[in-house]
Image: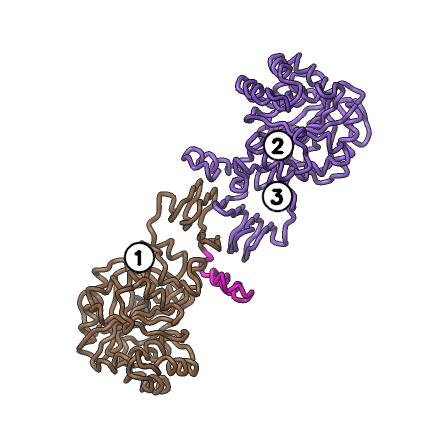
Chain colours: A purple, B brown
Amino acid sequence: MSLYALILAGGVGARFWPRSRQLQPKQFLSVFSENSLIQDTLNRIAPLVAADKVRVMTRFDQAHLLREQLPNLSEQQLVLEPFSRSTGPAIAVAARLLAAQDPEAMMLVLPSDHRIQDQPLFQETLSQAIEYVRTHDVLMTVGIQPSHPETGYGYLLFDNQPLQTGLHPLYAVRQFVEKPEIEAARRYVQSERYLWNSGMFIWKAKTLLAELALHAPELYQAVMQLPDNQSDPDFDAQLKTLYSQLESGSIDTVVLEKSAKVCVIKGFFGWSDVGSWESVYQLSPHDNSGNVVRGDAFTYDVSRSYIYTPQRFSALIGVSDLLVVDTEDALLICHRDRAQDVRLVVQHLESTSRGELC
Amino acid sequence: MSLYALILAGGVGARFWPRSRQLQPKQFLSVFSENSLIQDTLNRIAPLVAADKVRVMTRFDQAHLLREQLPNLSEQQLVLEPFSRSTGPAIAVAARLLAAQDPEAMMLVLPSDHRIQDQPLFQETLSQAIEYVRTHDVLMTVGIQPSHPETGYGYLLFDNQPLQTGLHPLYAVRQFVEKPEIEAARRYVQSERYLWNSGMFIWKAKTLLAELALHAPELYQAVMQLPDNQSDPDFDAQLKTLYSQLESGSIDTVVLEKSAKVCVIKGFFGWSDVGSWESVYQLSPHDNSGNVVRGDAFTYDVSRSYIYTPQRFSALIGVSDLLVVDTEDALLICHRDRAQDVRLVVQHLESTSRGELC
């Protein structure tokens, strides 16, 4: 029973403007190290998944970035979408292809743009989940022990009784909760019955397909009509037709929220979806003034700020709590409390037909 | 008795970094309009001084900027210094040259980088002062009615009794005061006996030379040994030798503070020495949020800020009271209260041998 990895790399990352652009999204950026986030993602799972069993899914117009950053991937390992329909259709298509090629395929589904702090613990947690899935027909999610009442994440309510105890206990999932208001988030955290939904999953391809047949029969029928292999000359055209007829939907709403087979493994390895420049600031090492400086900057009475200025000299005086991101053709200066509003810049640029900047 | 204008254009403007540089100082920048400050300065006095009677003094390494921005000036109208020794030596040299060429020359001495709000009133004030100087051997300063207790300007204490009344009263000057602390500045303003020292002067060249002979005999002797004309083949070398032996000193400390012939005309025309980005902010028209935007910027919840971004798109979110100056190779982000500290950036760049940026 072979284990495959499916790396989802179709995102846009509008909150990472001006570094992320339509044609250079967040997962392809070097945010914390020399490696891009997607390179880090693949390195992290190298001990778990054989190199030839990795699949990466992205949009056609980002394929060149994949080939550039991951030159060891063969074309057979890329699954290209005509445009994005969120994770539901993407994962369904990938499960259908893997099941056709290997009826016993297990899938480890991972976003390409997250940050993991303790990689050995991450690998240990996934190993245990993989072993469980090998012997159980379940849809395994990875839940993160919440460190604070975060309103930017979805939550999973898990069952009282663990399915399996041990270092990383496993539970059945009772309920999926969308991003909550702050009061609800506080209740969730204090109850110790909720975990953050990390968007990482493990299951057999055939288990997912069976659950799709049950809970999303149209999507199931549609993906089963695709050619067996993405190298089939008709594949791209048929996928485009299929996507044109589909609505966007996350794998959560498409199947997980409806399935009785969902369980969760509790992760303690330090995780972030790196949702904004603020989280990049939080996750980066700070100097004595609480600043994170990447590039060539002079700071005087500057505190608690993120400063990215790799191409030009920047001088900051008497400011605090700023996110400053300086690129070739665009500059962002944003209060740290307003990191979520960076997407408004992208909306502004789109609405004023200035696509070259977004 | 001909009137000459002497425009002093040798300044550096370190507080205008990153727009001002050693080789592109403040007076050559377009700050408020399409014209540079020095172009505005010359335009302002065109009704008062014949075009061929204008002299401009600057450093050799800035002469190309003068020729570029003021193409109508002949080489005879430029007086070039090997390096800067502040206004004392510069004005003494110019007075010596003018007196040699025209013994009855009157000089209107003006900085090249100031801002005047009411130009007709400015011209009227200067006209009256010029008329007075024509018939009196005085060193006339132009004092500005203070609008607030400014600690960035020097002050002039004037006599009780006016020498001449009228729209722009004239007084003898009792005392020069260096930039005061805030408490002293408040007393000065409330007393109504002090004016801001604008650095604009009117006198006969021969009056100044006579006062130099009395109060600064070494400087007087030195400048009298220079050739009569700056086109003399020996002039540049001799001026360089002279400057090497001189200390820097403002015309105030060199002669005005010691002379009994100093008087002042009261100006109400709205004046600023445009000493920092903060004063540029103050003097520029604001939008409804109190912002001044020059260039291509998206602002969201931004207030009371100056944003200069002519070459790139900049986005600002949730910030206030910032000075943002974005140039080709350097970026400044400074709290408005800290505009005076911009010179620290230039000091930092000099001390780290990064002259290309300052």
Q: Secondary structure at mark 3?
A: loop
Q: Is residue B122 left or right of residue A145?
A: left
What label does residue A9 carry, if any?
A: 2
Q: Residue at x 35, y 45 (%)?
A: B287
Q: Which mark is residue B35?
A: 1
* Mark whose residue sits in front, 1 or 2: 2
Question: How far, Cα to Cα, is label 1 from label 2?
Answer: 51 Å
User: The residue under label 1 is which amino acid type?
Assistant: Asn
The part of the image, by quadrant, that contains residue A133 is: top right
Nearest the eye: A263 or A95: A95
Locate residue B189 relative to residue A358 in the image: left or right.
left
The stretch in magenta equals B337-358
**Identity of the amino acid at label 2?**
Ala
Left or right: residue B96 compared with residue B280: left
Residue B45 falls inside the magenta stretch: no
Q: Chain of mark 3?
A: A
Q: Is residue B185 above or below residue A104?
A: below
Q: Secondary structure at mark 2?
A: loop
Q: Is residue B302 above or below residue A229?
A: below
Q: Which mark is residue A31?
A: 3
On the picture, is B32 further left or further right than A345? left
Q: Is residue A128 among what the camera can see?
A: yes
* Camera-nearest residue between B134 and B5: B5
Contact between labelled residues 2 and 1, with CB atoms less than 8 Å apart: no
Q: Chain of mark 1?
A: B
Say which residue appears at 40% left-offset and 69% top-offset.
B61
